[in-house]
Amino acid sequence: MKKLTLALAASAAVLFAAGGAFAADKAKACFIYVGPIGDFGWSYQHHQGALEMQKNLGGEEKVEIAYLESVPEGADAERAIERFARSGCNIIFTTSFGYMDATNAVAAKFPDVKFEHATGFKRDTPNVATYNSKFHEGRYVQGVIAAKMSKAGVAGYIASFPIPEVVMGINSFVLGAQSVNPDFKVKVVWANTWFDPGKEADAAKALLDQGVDIITQHTDSTAPMQVAHERGVKAFGQASDMIKFGPETQLTSIVDNWGPYYTERVKAVMDGSWKQVDVWGGMKEGHVVMAPYTNMPDDVKKLAEETEAKIKGGFNPFTGPIKKQDGSEWLAAGATAQDGELLGLNFYVQGVDDQLPKQ
Amino acid sequence: MRLELAKRPQHSKLFSALSPFIAFVLTVIAGAVLFALLGKSPGAALYAYFITPLTDLWSLHELAIKAAPLILIGVGLAVCYLSNNWNIGAEGQFVMGAVVGAMLPILYPGLQQSPLALPVMLLMGALGGAAYAAIPAFLKARFNTNEILTSLMLVYVAQLFLDWLVRGPWRDPAAMNFPQAPRFTGYAVLPELLPASGRANIGILFALVAAVLLWVLLTRTKKGFEIRVIGMSPRAGRFAGFSTRGAIFFSFLLSGALAGLAGISEVSGAIGRLQPSISPGYGFAAIIVAFLGRLNPLGIVAAGVVLALTYLGGEVAQIEVGVSDKVVRAFQGLLLFFVLACDTLIHYRIRFVPSERPAAVLPEAKSDA
């Protein structure tokens, strides 16, 4: 028992010594993830971005990284964020929508710490910034590829939750597909989860049984890719390049590339230029990157590359004429959707074979 | 050779009392080995896990927030389990309590300005949880349905119902179509205990009061005696004139009401609004808490605090020592394993039963065959 006490006291001393040493010349960036960093999807990519940021800014000498995985989006989030704020973090990235209230509550108590909340819209105090990516730009390219590759003219879409971002992605995918084949349809299955390989695989099987011959997903596991491989159809990856899970299956994948943004923001903290922002970056800014176009004929690949170039050049996938699901007009020819409208999107465009929950 | 657990004729009072401490020491040793194998300093990791969360006032507040629902649900479940009613659906009753209690601030936002709002909400929450627990109780009393299955299945129904509410009819119009209900305001918010030092709310008081009341009920009243007798032997209970059905309803409604109260306290306190997920599995973790506390309400208070500490300590260990989330959970599992193993060995001993030898070696066995 005596030895244990000694060990505890010694380690405590080491701990406090280490705690005092960095503050002056080293920044500490902290990350809260909603899933495990091994999900090969959303949280994995945020962590990759964090590691890239650390490398860009001079490695462990200059930037210390700390993170918490699988933090539930409820009362636990506020405690986790506050623990970070008190442990000497200079900037804290909270990487899921459900952390919005908690992030703002803690930020109000720690004005000297910077907070960055992904996918939210609340910035109650000047030390809170929000950021997100235009993933739907990538989905438009996927739609173009899907319409070229599908014989049935129907794609299966595994969706997570009916929030604006997901609805936006479905619409963008359909619009991309319809730019090639105006009659293209999409069937949607709501998995009601961001990460559950079992449910996602079941959703993929259900869609394939309904006659779709291409699979795309807005959930984070690699399970749908693996089901598509077993059934011999093509699929799109999500969040990260999933090519090693479907070397003959993946057409491309939307890669969430957070590295450049994290580098920019932590650097701003280090040189004192950090300011509140609301960033919504897309392909042009390098926040959304397409994985290599594989398993497709050269003409499809060429069209995909052209579409990607067009979006990088400023083309908005939501450019009229676009009709809503019920046939009424949404955008007139040539009109484009405003960012504000997209960020609260709660209806489908024509060609989506599904109903959204009503308010 | 095989191992058998044989019941001890009588168990040592001394070791019963020491068991939690022995379990703790074993956990610390096993944890130290685990952390050392991972190349982390065992001392630093254990300090982060068990001590750091207790060194800050704000962190003690967080401990109270985390322990309150575990204790409140756990003491209710203890009554259920003592009476041999296996309510596994406290998670669902927690959610339904939150939903029913939240009807007042969401459907009648104006009432949040009245000081009566909170007591009414808490009452509605408890009634909501009790009503939801009445379903498996009725099915068991009337049709002899297995309450483990029905109460568990109703958890998913409650969770999906809440999910539908916050995405559909109860969605906050100001939330940009994101799934959350409007924030509670005014008197609908559970008051904080000591706002100067942290955000703990009066939920922890509900938990402590409930624990003391149930301890009195179980140890000092005829009702408590009745519950124990029926739990140990329903037949003996019937001879004594106790109603088995009565015990089913009593224990289910009581544990449902406490789970519901925990649910409405959580959303009006720590979270502040209804959202798709309001519990990281409190209803299930409370089952562990109930057994860790040996189904004794006062033991459950201690067990709830210990389990809450392992959540907080796990985060500190991740942040300060850099061990992964998975290791933290494995360590939590070790703690539970040792506690339950020690308790088991107090009541049972391990007996080595030699396997049957080949017949040739034991001639006398031959004649039997």
Image (spheres, rainbow, N blue to C red):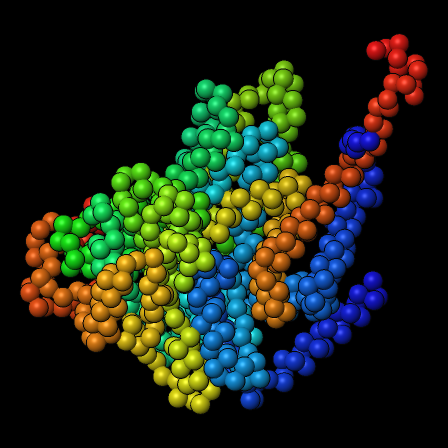
Tell how many labels. 0
Q: Position of residue A109 (x, y in %)?
A: 45, 75
Q: What's the residue at 33%, 47% (across, down)? A: A233
> In which quarter of the view is residue A131 placed?
bottom left
Q: What's the residue at 45%, 20% (across, down)? A: B142
Residue B149 visible in the shown view: yes
Q: Position of residue A189 (x, y in %)?
A: 30, 45
Q: Is residue A155 above or below residue A179?
A: above
Residue A5 lies left or right of residue B321; in this view the side is right
> In which quarter of the view is residue A128 placed?
bottom left
In this orientation, which residue lies closer to the viewer: A139 or A94?
Answer: A139
Q: What's the residue at 59%, 62% (across, down)? A: B324
In this orientation, which residue lies closer to the viewer: A291 or B201?
Answer: A291
In this orientation, which residue lies closer to the viewer: B56 or B44?
Answer: B44
Residue B355 lies left or right of residue A88; in this view the side is right
Q: Position of residue B105 (x, y in %)?
A: 31, 53
Q: Is residue A143 above or below residue B76?
A: below
Residue B51 lies left or right of residue A28; in this view the side is right
Residue A136 visible in the shown view: no
Residue farthest to the top, as pictured: B367
Q: Position of residue A288 (x, y in %)?
A: 33, 69
Residue farthest to the front, as pictured: A298
In this orientation, which residue lies closer to the viewer: A56 or B275?
Answer: A56
Picture quarter with the N terminus of chain B: top right
Q: What's the residue at 61%, 58% (across, down)? A: B328
Residue A111 lies left or right of residue A130; in this view the side is right
Picture quarter with the C terminus of chain B: top right
